[in-house]
Image: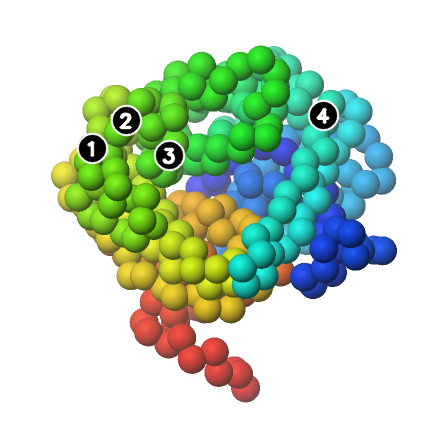
């Protein structure tokens, strides 16, 4: 299998142990994360070779982050050294009826000062068949948005499949541009689009049929199909539109499902009731990583690819940290209906 390339920030995650609040903490657990690096780790766990393109400062903390990626088998040959600092985010885990909380500390991070021309994309994409980015990266700075555009244009010239997850983060868009001014033009060059109904409305002005049905949080086939069809009309290069649906009963109890539209057929995944969430951050990344694997592996079976992705991301909710550390066998076991959680001896 050829390589998958991802482009985005490597971050330091600091979180109080367990379910402590920030005000209770006198120490923090350390993890190295990032939407695109999370996806790369998922893919390497599934046996897909990956390379992460990023930029980090030349210091010991960055070395620790890169060592974590090496440990998981992610290629870091195209990580550029330079800039001021590694981005940080603080996570307070929610529980039951208390929601979680994220505080970002990413101003002047190394990747926000990345510039076009720093990467030779023909070299980066040599031996690759897939490129993935998320809406988080162009939210960081105009420079990062420009490099996203540079990468998308290069990948299209080389006939590489391009996927994107809108991944809207309201707290990040602070450099004078609105997401609707930046993302639509970038997404038009992509083939596999992951976006929910809020993304569609905010960035493209799309109103789903029976909007009130979506606001209930429950899966409504007609409403989601309406969003997918309208998005595909706006995006001429799109081959598939994918949406996940999280129905929160509480911070610890969610229903989780997804849909996929390929321009002809509309597929719905099983719904998993996740009753004791350990860590939900990275759930969308785990879905996207597993979906890329599924589309590469089950090339003529969109239903199986979707089912694999939702099962893999269901399992991610049982793992501390942003990264999904599950195997293909574990996902396939859940897909076949074994949700017993028995000890494997």
Q: Distance between the residues labelled 3 and 4?
A: 26 Å
In the rendered image, residue 62, in percent from the top left (x then y), is placed at 77, 38
Q: Which of marks 1 and 2 is in front?
A: 2
Instruction: Of the two numbered discs 2 and 4 on the same chain, state the one appearing first in sequence.
Output: 4
Residue on which disc 1 sits: 229
Q: Which of marks 2 and 4 is in front?
A: 2
Q: Residue 68 carries which label?
A: none
Q: Is residue 113 visible?
A: yes
- Local SS, label 1: helix
In the rendered image, residue 157, in percent from the top left (x then y), is placed at 39, 18
Q: Which colour scheme is used?
A: rainbow
In the rendered image, residue 12, in percent from the top left (x then y), is placed at 72, 42
Q: Distance between the residues labelled 3 and 2?
A: 9 Å
Q: Is residue 157 above or below residue 300?
A: above
User: In the picture, residue 345 is in which quadrant?
Assistant: bottom right
Q: Do the residues labelled 2 and 4 touch (CB within 8 Å)?
A: no
Q: Is residue 317 visible?
A: no
User: Who's the residue at 19% across and 36% down the image?
Assistant: 209
Residue on which disc 2 sits: 206
Instruction: Of the two numbered discs 1 and 4 on the same chain, state the one appearing first in sequence.
Output: 4
Instruction: Of the two numbered discs 3 and 4 on the same chain, state the one appearing first in sequence.
Output: 4
User: Who's the residue at 39% across and 66% down the image?
Assistant: 273
- Disc 1 crowd, CA 10 A, few/some/many (<14, 14-19, 20+): some
Instruction: Of the two numbered discs 1 and 2 on the same chain, state the one appearing first in sequence.
Output: 2
Residue on which disc 4 sits: 107
Residue on which disc 3 sits: 198
User: Who's the residue at 37% across and 76% down the image?
Assistant: 338
Q: Distance between the residues labelled 1 and 2?
A: 10 Å
């Amino acid at each position: 299998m050829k390589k998958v390339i991802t482009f985005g920030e490597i971050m330091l995650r600091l979180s109080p142990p367990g379910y402590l609040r920030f005000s209770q903490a006198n120490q923090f657990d350390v993890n190295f994360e990032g939407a695109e690096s999370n996806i790369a780790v998922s893919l390497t766990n599934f046996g897909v070779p990956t390379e992460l393109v990023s930029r980090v400062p030349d210091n010991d903390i960055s070395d620790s982050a890169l060592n974590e990626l090496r440990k998981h088998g992610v290629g870091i040959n195209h990580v550029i050294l330079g800039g001021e600092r590694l981005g940080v985010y603080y996570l307070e885990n929610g529980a039951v009826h208390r929601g979680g909380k994220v505080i970002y500390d990413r101003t002047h991070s190394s990747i926000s000062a990345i510039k076009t021309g720093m990467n030779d994309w023909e070299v980066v994409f040599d031996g690759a068949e897939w490129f993935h980015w998320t809406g988080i990266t162009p939210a960081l700075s105009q420079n990062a948005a420009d490099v996203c555009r540079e990468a998308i244009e290069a990948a299209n010239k080389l006939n590489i499949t391009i996927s994107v997850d809108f991944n809207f983060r309201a707290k990040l868009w602070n450099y004078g541009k609105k997401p609707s001014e930046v993302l639509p033009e970038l997404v038009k060059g992509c083939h596999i689009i992951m976006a929910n109904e809020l993304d569609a409305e905010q960035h493209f002005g799309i109103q789903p049929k029976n909007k009130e049905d979506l606001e209930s949080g429950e899966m409504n086939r007609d409403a989601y199909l309406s969003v997918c069809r309208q998005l595909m009309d706006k995006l001429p290069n799109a081959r598939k539109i994918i949406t996940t649906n999280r129905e929160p009963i509480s911070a610890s109890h969610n229903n989780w499902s997804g849909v996929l539209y390929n321009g002809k057929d509309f597929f719905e995944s099983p719904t998993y009731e996740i009753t004791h969430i350990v860590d939900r951050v990275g759930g969308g990344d785990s879905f996207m990583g597993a979906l890329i694997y599924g589309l590469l592996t089950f090339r003529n079976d969109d239903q199986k690819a979707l089912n694999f992705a939702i099962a893999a991301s269901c399992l991610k909710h049982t793992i501390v940290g942003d990264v999904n550390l599950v195997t293909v066998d574990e996902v396939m076991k859940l897909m076949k209906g074994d949700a017993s959680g028995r000890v494997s001896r």
